[in-house]
Image (cartoon, rainbow, N blue to C red):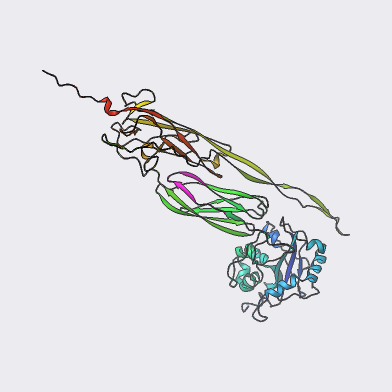
Amino acid sequence: MGQGTSQNSWSPGNEGVRVTVIRAESHDPVTRPIDLTNKHPNIAYSFGKVSKMSYTRGSALMIDTNPYEYVNPAQSLPRIISSKSLGQANIEQIKSYFTDEQVVRSIAGLTGMDFDTLVGGEYRLLLEPISFLKFQGTLIAVTATEAALYDEMLSGGLRAVLPTVAFQNLPLSMFLETPDLGYPAWGGPTSGIRSNSEIKSSLGLGIVRFRDVPPEEPEITTYDYEYRTNTEVITAVEVRGGQSDPDHPVSVTFSVGGRSYEVGEVYYPSGDSQLAWIRWTTPEQPQTMTMTVRVRGGGGISKGTLHIKVVDLDENPPPDPNADDRNDGFTRPSVPSNAEVTFASWGVWRPWWREYWVWHSGDEDDDGYWCDHGWWEFDLDRYSASLTADMRITTDEKSPTATGRTMKSGYGFQEKVTTHVSTNQSSAVTSAQNAVTYFPEFQYERFWRLLERMNGGYDMTHEFKKNGYSTYERRTHFTPIWYPDGSYTPYTWLLDCWTPAGMLSMNLTDSITIDGNLWSDWHIAPQNPE
């Protein structure tokens, strides 16, 4: 590498490959790793026979001064680690070697696996390049992962003297092009000294699969949303693909409005899916927003984008009614009906471990051992939410001739909407936050009133906002003086009760009776003859 010293160096060709059989479903190592090499290295110390998978799961790095165990395979290994003197390693030759039937049969024999069992599709070969390095005057054997862990143990002591071979050529000699066993595909640079975190998470490994396809990466299903300003909402996506459990979990990160929200422990069985959601409050001003959703897990990363439109329902209140307004061509419109959903349900998968203990017979020096070959089972916790509401309109007490629910046109009335939300997962359900009332004199369009939230919680009430045209600043709506006698029916759409399964909403109506008009309450008194 041009950086060696008498105490710290590496000779090209001083290399090998560690092979471990891994159960594909659980990611458990099922055999003791074996180290293959064409050399006969005189190793002073190594770190034992520990696979990258075991380190990933938390095994500590331990120095092992016992005689180094290795195997010289019948078919010599191809060059694994590139160097200036010997040239570039050929990844196609490496792939060809470790997928050769005779080589795989030999590995099965060396690890104690039955060949047909090994290649049946339930197992993987985890490959890790090994380098034999002279460090501080002593020859040691390290995988890329062990080099990174050892460097952290030495506070950078290994990287300081052997940066290129241990932290570039060794880790970059093998990496994944397709995610597998919980390790991602490497999309970073293929040259240059890599960080310890990059090496531990993504480099210095190859995987051989048999008779199957790579594990499914998680996929997300997203939808575009329209929200109202200053409203608490639930934004949900559906995650599927492969299986997510505590051994290989999936997490989802939502980014919107300059903030990120991470949802962890998104579990689901193979062939099924899980909703993941966040609860957040929309801005006070109308705008368009972009929400990005990133799913990590299953050996890969998936991304999605949500386009969100935030609208202000308070921008089109009715105009000031006038005493001389006319509408001679008015016809009574039909009461509209928006989408109404008053019940929603969803589920959350909860994984649990089913133990399955298997006895592994030993040899003459080993009595054997029990091993748990269990698997993850899933229960589905079910949740739901329901919405009920009532709308009530009453004549304004400032209407002097109103009786009960009958009044003359030209006067006003009040409205009160009472709501109730019931759920067994309150963290995932909002109250019914917005109510919008439309009026027959405008054909239930053109103008409307956004009601004011009078309290909070699942029993929220809504009333008209104070009317700027009311002399007494009443919470009222004035009927037009020209409105014909008969039934007068405002329509209210109650909305923005959000759940992971979508929005709950209701159509509400109530009626009063118009009989006469405001002018009939006026008269001209005769002039006093005196």
Q: Position of residue 409 (x, y in %)?
A: 32, 30
Relative vertical location of residue 518 with respect to residue 86 in this rendering, above or below:
above
Query: Where is residue 393, by image quadrant?
Result: top left
Quadrant into which the N terminus falls? bottom right
Does residue 80 show up? no
Closest to the observer: 17 or 75?
A: 75
Does residue 2 show up? yes
Query: Where is residue 8, by image quadrant?
Result: bottom right
Quadrant into which the C terminus falls? top left
Closest to the observer: 146 or 308?
A: 308
Relative vertical location of residue 279 with respect to residue 69 in this rendering, above or below:
above
Query: Where is residue 187, by image quadrant?
Result: bottom right
- Farthest residue to the left: give it: 530
The range drawn in magenta is 221-236
Relative vertical location of residue 392 with respect to residue 139 in this rendering, above or below:
above
- Farthest residue to the right: give it: 364
The secondary structure that most of the magenta stretch takes on is: strand
Q: Position of residue 220 (x, y in %)?
A: 58, 54
Q: Position of residue 77 (x, y in %)?
A: 75, 74
Q: Is residue 457 magenta?
A: no
In the image, is 237 to the left or to the right of 26? Answer: left
In the image, is 216 to the left or to the right of 115? Answer: left
Q: Position of residue 201 (x, y in %)?
A: 63, 62
Report the residue at 42% width, 48% height from top.
311
Report the residue at 55% width, 56% height from top.
294
| Number of disc labels | 0
Closest to the observer: 305 or 30?
A: 305
Q: Is residue 224 magenta?
A: yes
